[in-house]
């Protein structure tokens, strides 16, 4: 939750408990994707930038495609109006999520060559760029995890310098992650995005 909501929960616990319960109850009959898309539209309607950034990412994590997100926003045009839609798209462009780029909309996932597998020593972390993506890579024996460098909170691109030992901390809101597992260990509650991987002919590949 935001600092403002955390404050209200502490200052007016009875009212906020009832309000949050109301929101949960009213969404019970909705599947996760529909609920996520409605929340995104709500954040556009109220022009809540941090909320829009956060729930846009959540919509993708629930399985919504970029095309579904765009269609939901555009379909709400009669209620939102063009000004609010342009406001939302400006923020979306600033977030620079690769999947929303026109050339990738609706494109099939494919394998990308990352680096020679022997360039990731056992028990160590490597950092590299493949096209428009920056990646953190951790190896433990034959298992290699490849993570998107973007924070799952608001897609902030976490720099290599934010890694201390095996702890990766996003500089924007201090979400921290265990690079061995990708699990969020401080502040937040969602893991780093991990890509499917394979090793062929001594080269590491990741799929997105």
Image (cartoon, rainbow, N blue to C red):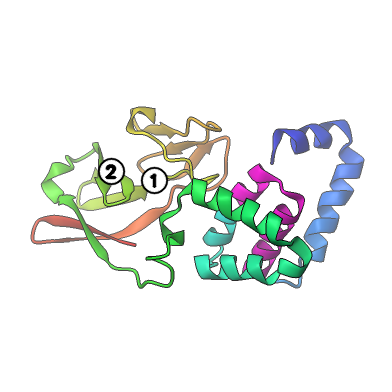
Disc 1 element: loop
Q: Residues within 10 Å of mark 1 (few under 14, many from 20)?
A: some
Q: Which residue is mark 2?
A: 138
Q: Tell which of 96 and 140 is nearer to you.
A: 96
* Res. 37 image quadrant: bottom right
- Tell me the quadrant of the picture where the N terminus can be found: top right
Left or right: 195 in relation to 63? left
Q: Which numbered dot is residue 90? A: none
Q: Is residue 180 magenta?
A: no
Q: Give the CA separation, mark 1 to mark 2.
A: 9 Å
- Measured along the vertical axis of the image, is residue 77 above or below residue 89? below
Residue at the location (82% across, 64% down)?
26
Task: From the top left corner, tell me how far across and down residue 96 is, in percent.
Answer: 45, 49
Left or right: 155 in relation to 26? left
Q: Is residue 42 magenta?
A: yes
Q: Which numbered dot is residue 181? A: 1
């Amino acid at each position: 939750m935001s600092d403002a909501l955390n404050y209200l929960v502490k200052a007016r616990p009875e009212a906020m408990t009832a309000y949050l319960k109301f929101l949960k109850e009213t969404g019970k009959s909705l599947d996760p994707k529909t609920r996520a898309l409605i929340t995104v539209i709500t954040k556009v309607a109220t022009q809540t930038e941090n909320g829009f950034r956060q729930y846009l990412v959540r919509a993708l994590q629930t399985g919504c495609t970029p095309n579904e997100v765009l269609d939901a926003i555009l379909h709400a045009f009669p209620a939102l109006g063009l000004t609010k839609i342009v406001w939302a798209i400006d923020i979306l462009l600033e977030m620079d999520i690769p999947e929303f780029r026109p050339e990738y909309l609706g494109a099939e996932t494919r394998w990308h060559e990352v680096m020679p597998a022997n360039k990731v020593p056992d028990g160590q972390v490597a950092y590299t760029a493949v096209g428009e993506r920056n990646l953190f890579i951790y190896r433990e024996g034959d298992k290699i995890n490849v993570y998107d460098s973007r924070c799952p909170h608001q897609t902030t691109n976490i720099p290599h310098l934010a890694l201390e030992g095996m702890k990766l901390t996003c500089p924007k809101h201090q979400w921290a992650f265990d690079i061995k597992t990708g699990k969020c260990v401080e502040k937040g509650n969602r893991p780093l995005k991990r890509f499917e991987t394979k090793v062929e002919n001594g080269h590491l590949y990741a799929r997105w």
